[in-house]
Image (spheres, rainbow, N blue to C red):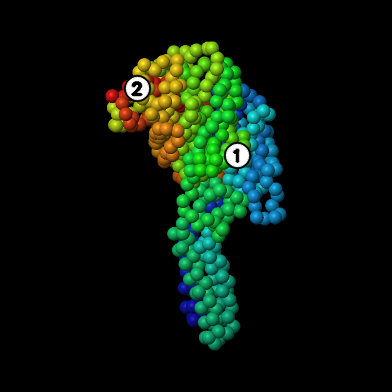
Amino acid sequence: MSRLREICLPLVLALLALFSTTPTAAADSANAGADVQVAQSLGQRELTVVARRVTSIPGPLRVDVITHQGTAAGPLRLQLVPTGASTDEYQPASGVPTSTAMVILGEKPGPYGATLDVDRTGPTDLTISDGVHTARIPLVLVGQAMSPPERVAYVGLATTGLLLVVSLVVATRVRRGVWIALPVTATVTALAVAITGAVLSTSAPPPPEPGLQRDPTVDNAANPYRIDRPAVTDYSRPSAMLIAEQPVVDSGHATDVFFSLIDTATGLPADDLVIHDSALIHLLVVAPDGQLSHLHPIRVAPGRYSVPLSPTAAGRYAVSAEFTRRGGGVQTVRLPGGLISRGEKPAAPAPFDGPGMRMIDGLHVHVTATGLRAGRPTTLTATVGSDPVLQPWLGMLGHLVIAGPIPRDAPADDLGTAVLDSAVWAHAHSMGGHGGADMPGMEHGTNHRGNSEPVQDDSASSLPPMVGAPPLNGDSPPDETVTAFGPDVPFTFTFPRPGRYLVWIQSQRDYRVLTIPVRLDIS
């Protein structure tokens, strides 16, 4: 028995140590997932759709629809529609809804929810319909996967345990040393394989993520470690063109304007957008009187989007779209020529004032600006009210949109043209204020000149359209139901050249998005 103890005790200790240190596959599991937030301009409703993380497949998917001030009550129909093809001939056909639920929006702004049933992994459209408009939000439902080194480690562990039992049985029944050495040698070999797999699993690079880097399929969403993955490491995509199907609209009428995104390399629809800053597309529209509309078109077909516009004045409207293509960075494109609104009603005088106190929707807002010099960081802060009750919007405390330099003699009723022709069109974010809690992420700003330029976005709130994928910081960013930020909304931005700039600060309070226009003169 002493000889048996000498042989088996080291194996048992090594086996216990390996079980205690072998990493699990939680990083690729739906249990490690994050919520996905998507802003949608559905008809005349401004909504934020929050798809809660999926903890198991098959399992439930909780969807919350957050409404804002002025959103009409009524029912919405939610459906899950698988869109991916599979190599499994027994897999049900795509394009057929697999789960349906109704959400009844009330008069009070806030979250309204429903639960859908997820029965498979792969690319899936979450459709939301008000009976007239149907938004198609692309999601990727990912399953639990294990890397090849981890699989080798677990197989080695199981084999080691089995051979250890065999070694014990042989050692108690056979007295010849050569027969005892055989199972012991096999056990040591299996243990060595398990240890090697465990060591390699900690350093093996992760596979390209379906939906973020790779085009998702049913197969690679279920197991991104499949050996049929491409050998390329550059997953970037070319730029895309923004085309308006109806560049002329009528003033005083609500119109659904359709846009197409076209791949500049192939001329085909670009239908590979990922969720960036809680939206597929951020559409910025500047009216002739300088009013800014920050809209989020709904996806109605591959590469085709729709957004409601209600132009109030005749003239030219500047339009810019910000989006992220799969495997690439942020792209900002302007609509060539903008949109033309026909009518006889002229634009009202521009509402822009310099830094100072003003009233916005019944709230006192104080704007301060320091360092107003080109080439140096400028700090711009808006204090909204006096209490820390601001809510995140699009994953941020505040948004800053900048256009300029604007000619000082630009007509006050034709600012849309001045903005469309400006050299700089920038979009920066605020992540925290002095009066409230900081939000996760980093400040960033983007500049562009011309029609299409890819830009970099280091914001930690940029999430791929995946339900079940791990977030960057281990937690989902707060949604709009959290009222604990502000009242200060600070920004830092470096103006590249001197001149007059038009600036819009946006933040949310009481489920209402406040837009604060500011005029800045950069020396």
Reply above or below: 516 against 306: above
Q: Position of residue 508 (x, y in %)?
A: 48, 26
Quick check: marks 1 and 2 in contact, CB under 8 Å?
no
Q: Which residue is mark 1?
A: 302
The residue located at (40%, 33%) in the rendering is: 449
Q: Quadrant of the C terminus?
A: top left
Numbered label attached to residue 510: none
Reply above or below: 161 against 412: below
Q: How many tags in the picture?
A: 2
Residue 417, picture quadrant: top left
Q: Position of residue 463 (x, y in %)?
A: 50, 41
Q: CA distance from mark 1 to mark 2?
A: 40 Å
Q: Position of residue 170 (x, y in %)?
A: 58, 80
Residue type of the residue flagged with mark 2: Arg
In the rendered structure, the answer to whether residue 313 lies left or right of residue 134 reads left
The residue located at (65%, 52%) in the rendering is: 86
The residue located at (54%, 87%) in the rendering is: 176
Q: Is residue 120 visible?
A: yes
The residue located at (46%, 63%) in the rendering is: 200
Q: Position of residue 188 (x, y in %)?
A: 50, 74
In the rendered structure, the answer to whether residue 368 lies left or right of residue 16 reads left
In the rendered structure, the answer to whether residue 80 lies left or right of residue 395 reads right
Q: Earlier in the sequence, mark 1 or mark 2?
A: 1
- Nearer the observer, 285 or 44: 285
Q: Is residue 368 visible?
A: no
**Label 2: few (<14), some (14–19) or many (≥20) C-alpha neighbours in 10 Å:** some
Residue type of the residue flagged with mark 1: Pro
Q: Which residue is mark 2?
A: 500
Reply above or below: 88 against 505: below
- Nearer the observer, 422 or 200: 422
- Please tell me whether mark 2 sits on a helix, a strand or a loop: strand
